Image (tube, grey):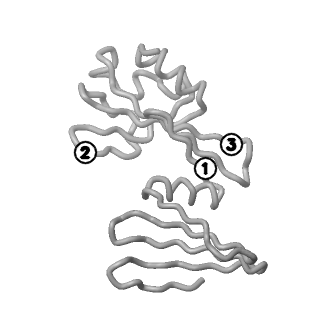
């Protein structure tokens, strides 16, 4: 890989394949990313401009750590473990759980979902202990299989 600083433009990363194909990625000073592909027998490269989010998605595809986002739900899948799909879901606390703890609600026992974080008044509670009591305005970050997430929304939160 060759790395070049392009004054007032950005940074260029260039890779050449054994067949002679070249791929260049330029991180522009504007925050956008340009992707160039020049096949060995071509005279002009194909080029596209990407947002940083689009570039991250392409990067996750190329590394095999696939992320699929749908509203407040992210699905993570891994190239080496094709049958593993982990869902990470964000959902607001409802009135019926305010004042109750993770332990009292038996979230994991009843649904299989693990509460991995809580967002509370701009602060993050990572790996909240079972005795953590939900407050009005909390956002729960939970992980599990899609069916488990839906069960949690239905059984615990009274949604769906």
Name the outermost residue toward the front.
43
Q: Give the x, y percent position of residue 115.
A: 45, 35
Which residue has dot 2 on it?
Answer: 123
Rounded to the nearest angstrom, the CA distance separating label 1 from label 2 is 28 Å
**Which residue is identified by label 1?**
66
Task: Please state if 112 lies on the left or on the right of 158 as rendered.
Answer: right
Crowd around label 2: few <14 · some 14–19 · many ≥20 (10 Å):
few
Instruction: Kindly identify the residue that appears in the image at 53 percent across and 22 percent down.
Output: 150
Q: Secondary structure at mark 2?
A: strand
Q: Residues within 10 Å of mark 1 (few under 14, many from 20)?
A: some
Judge from the rendering whether residue 37 lies leftward or rightward of residue 97; answer left or right: right
Q: Mark 3 highlights which residue?
A: 84
| Residue drawn at point x = 55 percent, y = 37 percent | 87
Vertical position of residue 83 compared to residue 149: above or below:
below
Q: CA distance from mark 3 to mark 2?
A: 30 Å
Q: Which image quarter: residue 17?
A: bottom right
């Amino acid at each position: 890989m060759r790395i070049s600083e392009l004054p007032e433009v950005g940074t260029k990363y260039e890779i050449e394949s054994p067949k002679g194909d070249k791929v260049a990625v330029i991180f522009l000073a504007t925050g956008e990313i340009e992707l160039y592909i020049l096949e060995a027998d071509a005279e002009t490269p194909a080029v596209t401009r990407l947002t940083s989010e689009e570039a991250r998605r392409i990067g996750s595809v190329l590394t095999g750590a696939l992320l699929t986002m749908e509203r407040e739900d992210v699905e993570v899948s891994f190239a080496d473990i094709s049958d593993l799909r982990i869902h990470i879901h964000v959902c607001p606390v409802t009135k019926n759980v305010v004042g109750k703890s993770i332990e009292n609600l038996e979230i994991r026992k009843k649904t299989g979902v693990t509460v991995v974080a809580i967002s509370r008044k701009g602060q993050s509670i990572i790996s909240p202990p079972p005795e953590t009591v939900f407050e009005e305005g909390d956002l729960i970050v939970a992980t599990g299989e899609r069916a488990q997430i839906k069960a949690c929304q239905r059984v615990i939160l009274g949604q769906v």
